[in-house]
Amino acid sequence: MATTKQPTETRRSFFGWIIGIASSVIGLGLVIPLVGYVIAPALKRRDTLWAKVGPTGSLRMGEPEELEYASTVKDGWRTVTAKKGIWAIKQPAGEVVVLSPICPHLGCGFRWDPGDHTFKCPCHGSVFDVTGKVLAGPAPRSLDVLPSKVEQGNLLVLYKEFKSGLDHPVEL
Amino acid sequence: MAGKIYEWLDARLNLKSLGHTLLDESIPGGASWIYVFGSATLFIFCLQATTGMFLALYYVPSPDSAYDTVQFIQHEVPFGWFVRGLHHWGASAVMVAVGLHLLQVYLYGAYKRPRELLWMVGVCLFLLMMAFGFTGYLLPWDQNAYWATQVGTNMVATVPVIGDGLVRVLRGGATLGALTLSRFFAVHTLFLPALMVCGIVVHLFILRRVGPAGPWSAEQAKQRSETFYPRQVYMDAVVMLGVFLLLVVLAWTVEFPLADRADPADHTFTPVPEWYFLFYYQFLKYVSGPLEPLATWVLPGLFILGLLLWPFIDRNPERRPSSRPMALASGGAFLLVVFALLGVSLWSLHTAPKIDPSVARGKVLFAQQHCMACHRIHGEGGMVGPDLSYVADHRPDRQWHLRHFHEPQSVSPGSIMPAFALEEKNLSDLTSYMLSLKSGIETSSGEELR
């Protein structure tokens, strides 16, 4: 080695600056888009639509009936027809109350027991009356009511899901 | 603050000596812009690894979903086009960087003793990079991906004795399908990266053991030497930034649309490989019949073997290019052949009649409007109306078709065809499709890829 050229202090800091700027531009140029890319699905609200579940004429007063709610939803890149069983109960005044099929305790599906006129959840034993009020078991709140309306004799439902385990309904 | 954290860590991990080892490696002859290609290659590889990992968040390797998930990434995920664009152009950029790196090492005779192993591992990394390109090409599962992979795997079948078995292993069965896609995905995203990382580690390890080669003249190398940091790091960083910005601009501005979804039944599709396989694609066109195996595996095999063992073939100890006429002549001849083939291929692709996008749109409209109910094209469709297979042969007039779509009876009295109340643009597309239906179009639309 004849000579070893030692860069002066200012040259060193100039190179340091350029290296720093290059790495920052590349880093930020990647991190900003990539964060957006990753969190996008978390920010997207699910779009649900009113779906026709059937005529109200065949419903019997005060007697819950399981109807099929089918709607086309986008699940990521897929467009799927989601099917859910919802509970429709015709009221004395003629309107229809629609209950979500999911137990507000931990999210199991409950059944209607026509014998003692209650909804029973098989998972942890919660019992609800026909209006959805908790009669027994660990459920923290009444069954969730889904928005519904009757148009030209057809029942329309807007399906929603709620967080389980809370004492009041919070939409997911 | 940062300084304090560094002091604290250094007191425990002895970072200063590590920094010294990493950054104070001496470069004979000093830093130079000609040495940036290795770092640039490594940088683009890291970029590919990063964008690839992020693509895997949404990509699903199954024939049912692959194409849809790529469309989803491209059109619906915020910045999806950006991540996919970087990955797409990065694949090309890494090939360019590897090529330049190899050329520089070749020109500088840097593969000679004691750096033979460094060169050989480098050649292996180059082959792995090619494998990345080949396996990644299938993943979007569009027509190009499917048919190009069909061709690529078929070439393996020409290897004697083991060829057939080898193709079946590659494809995961007799035909290209779900198992091919899933194994190409696994190889592209798990096996190859693992091998690549090991290879890079070995490559760098050997580099540190033997040291950088430096300039070809020993006097120049002795004149001065300089540490890796700061000047070489600075040059590498500037080049990396340049490459990154170039890729961003490409991803931003140059479209690379997906072809149609892969359709194994559509044998009319002519696939074109990526540009870095084009020279080979062109070469295959010249070699046919009994000579075919020569092109599909004998020559490539010999070439790879020759490249791998090059430091032992070229035993001339001299590094200065002027003292290595044979090595430079053979390298130059090889480049000349490759670039000539690439040029011919690009030229013939460029001059080959392209499928007009409005023809493609018209074809879609033709299906959507159920024209097939009455009209027949190449044996498919109803017989109520005239067969349209070669309609443009006797109806080459664009205006005639436009008027005919508006009001069939105005140009063809007594016709029972209904008028189609479509937008002008759609009618124009349909007309373009009609005008594309003429005899002899198949033969001129490009040779079949073998």
Image (tube, rainbow, N blue to C red):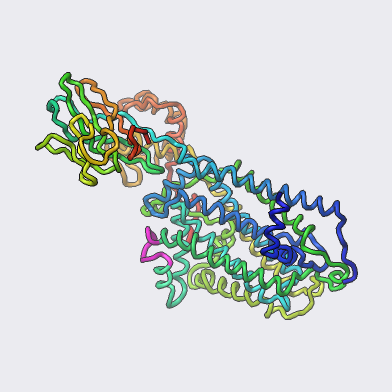
The relative height of residue A68 versus residue B184 in the rendered view (above or below) is above
Residue positioned 27% across, 26% down in the render: A148
| Left or right of B322 on screen, residue B279 | left
Residue positioned 43% across, 78% down in the render: B161
Q: Quadrant of residue A100?
A: top left
Of residues B180 and A105, the one drawn nearer to the viewer in this rendering: A105
Q: Specify whether residue B71 is painted magenta.
A: no
Quadrant including the N terminus of chain A: bottom right
| Left or right of A75 on screen, residue A87 | left
| Region in magenta | B170-179
Of residues A47 and B347, the one drawn nearer to the viewer in this rendering: A47
Q: How many marks?
A: 0
Quadrant including the C terminus of chain A: top left
Question: Can you name the residue that lies furthest to the left here?
Answer: A115
Residue positioned 38% across, 61% down in the render: B179
Q: What secondary structure prevails in the magenta region?
A: loop
Residue positioned 45% across, 26% down in the render: B424
The relative height of residue B330 versus residue B236 in the rendered view (above or below) is below
Q: Position of residue A35 (x, y in %)?
A: 55, 44
Q: Position of residue B82 (x, y in %)?
A: 56, 44
The relative height of residue B92 versus residue B389 in the rendered view (above or below) is below
Residue A61 in sight in this render: yes
Of residues A76 and B15, the one drawn nearer to the viewer in this rendering: B15
Q: Quadrant of residue A132?
A: top left
